[in-house]
Amino acid sequence: MIALFGSISFVLTIVFLTYVGFIMVPYLRHKPERPGNPADYDWHVFVPCRDEEAVIATTIERSRERFPEAHLWVIDDDSEDATSSIISAYAARDPYVHLVQRRLPEARTGKGDALNSAYAQLIDFLPEDADHSTIIVAVVDADGELAPNAFAAVAGPDCFGDPTVGAAQITVWMKNRDDKTPYPDKGKVANAFARYLLRMQDLEFRTVILAMQSLRQKTGTVGLGGNGQFTRLSVLDEIGEGYDAPWHGALLEDYELGLHVVLAGYQNRQVHDTHVAQEALPSFKRLVVQRSRWAQGNIQCIKYAPEILRSRNFDAAGIIECFYYLLLPFLQIIGFVVVSSIVISQAIALAQNPEMWNQIIINLPFIALLGLFFGAGPFVGWGLLYKIKCEPQISWAKALQWGFGFWLFVPYAILSISRAFWRIITGKNGWSKTRRNAETNANTSIAVEA
């Protein structure tokens, strides 16, 4: 049995290291992108909100200041706080700010439904002769901040300047990554751990996730995110005609939309040279809740596997990349079970034959070196790339420190994926809205269970 588990572990390790190599190469070879003219398009930004009184005023003001030409469609999903009244006040004095009001029982059924409400209101707002192919719809979180060059970057000739491009995703940064005291009322240890979580999330998005998107650029399978996604209105129309609505029921409605864009015959783009900034979570519990939702949405999207296989818009490389991503939660759980079984089996063997300790002690340097190279090495490498590509002002020692920290950070995925599978098994398919950092409510999330 140990031999079988060892073989499985070896195969999974090789697959993982191969994938890391595949995503690193295009990430390192990225070349600057050519900007375009935002005036060539009409811009509409969807901002889904639920109990966002702590952040929504700042988001509206910053968006109107940076992008005065864009209409802002702020969706209140039946908030219990002052979100609706704040949006209404801005809408009353600014014709470019629109309140999309949702009320129970139709409200609180998921982010996709909220976005579909804004889409319907936008269609009613536009003149009948509007050219939907030149109208770009962006989705930004209630705490999101688009970089000033965001519209110019996605309007470039390699993005929406190409008529075959239907959607784009921009890079995500963590705007509070340098926060020294995430919890002003707590002690040094709590704040040190919170700072660590903030930094790891920024490193994750700006290296690993962006590198994954760099590979997807090559395979034609760029995924859309919930924050900083841009889509042609004409493409949303086409998807809506085929599936009743542009956004659907998966908890990962953003990735689901990206699949539909490609299935409809268009291309997705990852735009590196601009970004949307959002809040990183200083709470491990809130982080696991958030990532569990993402993992569950990932698992739900497996239902599109037959369509991906049948579609002529996915080549062999695209199919392999999509299937790897869709199967990743299963591979991670299998890997965890295999490694745990090996450790338990070895522990039992050691208990039954204490003389094995002598052999382990003799081989300990080799075992440690092997573990560092294959276990920690790939993650430490991202810390070094984070300095080179993202934070050049930090020292190499700090980059190594963050790299080892990232190695210790990634096992959170096992908790998140396990929780996601448990929610599926127990029939919990509702949407959990993670609390903002500025909120003081003791609850860590608002959940709608279905």
Image (cartoon, grey):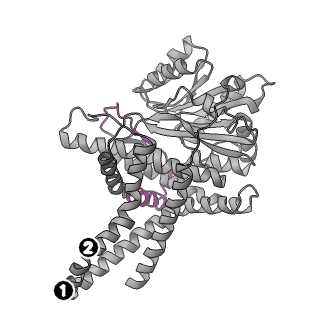
| Numbered circles on residues, count | 2
* 53 or 172: nearer the viewer: 172
Please tell me in which quadrant of the rendered image residue 423 appears.
Answer: bottom left
Which callout, 1 or 2, points to the residue nearer the camera? 2
Please tell me in which quadrant of the rendered image residue 124 appears.
Answer: top right
* 354 or 1: nearer the viewer: 354
Residue at x 31% of width, y 69% of height: 369
Image location (x, y in percent) of residue 254? 58, 45
Residue range (magenta): 414-442
Please tell me in which quadrant of the rendered image residue 113 appears.
Answer: top right
Image location (x, y in percent) of residue 82? 43, 23
Judging by the rendered image, the residue that carries numbered circle 1 is 354
Residue 380 magenta = no
Q: CA distance from mark 1 to mark 2?
A: 19 Å
Residue 438 magenta = yes
* 150 or 413: nearer the viewer: 150
Q: Which mark is residue 80?
A: none
Mark 1 falls on what kind of element?
Answer: loop
Quadrant into which the N terminus falls: bottom left
Q: In the rendered image, is residue 106 in sight?
A: no
Mark 1 crowdedness (10 Å alpha carbons): few <14, some 14-19, many ≥20: few
Image location (x, y in percent) of residue 213? 56, 49
Mark 2 crowdedness (10 Å alpha carbons): few <14, some 14-19, many ≥20: few
Q: Is residue 21 above or below residue 242?
A: below
Seen as rendered, the residue at the extreme right is 129
Judging by the rendered image, the residue that carries numbered circle 2 is 365
Circles 1 and 2 in contact, beta carbons < 8 Å:
no
Q: Is residue 364 left or right of residue 251?
A: left
